[in-house]
Image (cartoon, rainbow, N blue to C red):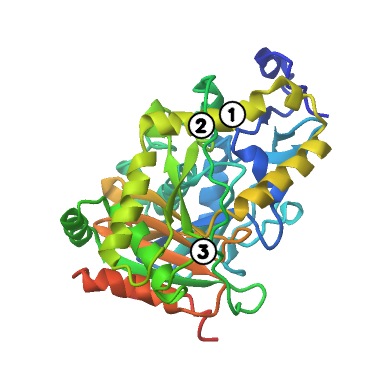
Amino acid sequence: MAPQEEQPQTRKRTLRHDQPAWDKLDNTANLFPVIATEEMSNVYRISVTLTEEIDRVLLQEALNRILPQFSVFRMRLHMGFFWYYFEENSRPAPIVRQEYSHPGAYIDKSRNNHYMFRVTYYQCRINLEVFHVLTDGAGGITFLKELVYQYLRLKYPELLQLDKDKISAGIFLDKEDSYVKNFKKGHEKVYKSERALTISGEELPKGEMGVVHGYLPVEQLKQVSKSYGVTINQYLVGAFVYGVYREYLNGKVSKVPIRCCVPVNLRPYYHSHTMKNFFAMVSATFKPEREEYSFREVLEIVAADLKEQITPENLDNIMSYNVSNEQNLILRAVPLVIKNFVMKQVYEASAKATSATVTNIGNIELKEPYRQYVENFYVTLSMSKGQNMKGGICSYNGMLTFTISSVLADLSVQKRIFQTIAADGVSVAIESNGAYYE
């Protein structure tokens, strides 16, 4: 049985060496075990493409070597009386397999040595898939980069002379719950409850997910975004919303808004280096009250909405609001079975207020000895309740990859998004996983 939350923190330091270490879930992670299903896995994928085909044996060895140093990934999930909790997993690392399922598929922990992440490969690509209960995209990319470094050192022993560290110098493996550490009393309700548009239609066969990658030069995006007076992230979210407006709503008036959730990495705002989840959700809302909005008009609305919300004061308010429920002494004493029921109801209601999610994990940098072996990265999101289409963004070596994942058979929204970007003079190269052509 899990140690009770009211026990002092020193409890973890007094465990005998033959007892596994335990840890609490961070504030955001508490929701994911409650809502995860095979259809809504809450698993994200970050992939890296190398210049040569992957050697499975070396990739397994690389994983075996780095996993002991990443305690956040070396955990298994348990259900306590009041909360879920982590316990150290002493089993061998998950088996590296050739890709066998669609991106972000549910992780059956009993078939994965009780780990909540997996590593797969296909030709030149390595996929890291993570159950969001462990960490967010920032934590995931830290782990994947170290996996790539170790793999390349095994494949090219001469790299050992250039980089002898097992884990890169300057990498933080902090496990703090930065939500609780930075929590402040006094906050306002932050989430919108107004019902939003649901992007629906004919779906792909069960168990399939369509993925479209758009490769966009960063310098061109910078120039175009600057011409509109917006950031690259605002520009891409605006293009996503406009694609939905033009193709799903056909440019018509709607009684409900298109609301796109945008996760914000909180680490830079609080000088945090935690490997656990540490992000806040803001949303871009566009409600067409007349017909025929131009892209510029939609973009201005979306950018203004995001700019208003992404401020230190508002992010502080969002974080404190989220943590306040966990800190409530009465709620803490409620058994987990009841908590789960309540959290599911709250989640069901909030899911109706969101149309889609677009996340940007930022620019990925690799150390000089390794860059020549890596072509690109991309991030793929799995579906959530009421969200049949999502976007993932990252950039590497001057190229930004905008990945749109969907379970819908219709490709018109994706086409409109990239046509809109191309019309602004940005060179767009498109790649698909083939789900639309089977």
- 130 left or right of 46 in image: right
What amino acid is at disc 3? Lys
**Badge 1 is on which residue?**
323
**Which residue appears at 45% of the width and 52% of the height?**
151
CB under 8 Å between discs 1 and 2: yes
Task: State the mark number for residue 255.
Answer: 3
**Which residue appears at 59% of the width and 38% of the height?**
28
Q: Nearer the viewer, residue 199 or 207?
A: 199
Q: Looking at the image, is mark 3 or mark 1 nearer the viewer?
A: 3
* Residue 269 vertical placement versus 57 (above, below): above
- 225 left or right of 200 in image: left
**Badge 2 is on which residue?**
319
Q: Nearer the viewer, residue 104 or 18?
A: 104
Q: Nearer the viewer, residue 54 or 361?
A: 361
* Residue 234 vertical placement versus 289 (above, below): above
**Which residue appears at 68% of the width and 52% of the height?**
348
**Which residue appears at 53% of the width and 79% of the height?**
435
Give coordinates of residue 44: x percent, y percent.
54, 55
Which structural element holds mark 3? Answer: loop
Query: Distance from label 3 to label 2 (Cα)?
Result: 30 Å
What amino acid is at disc 2? Met
Which structural element holds mark 1? Answer: helix
Badge 3 or badge 1: first in the primary sequence: 3
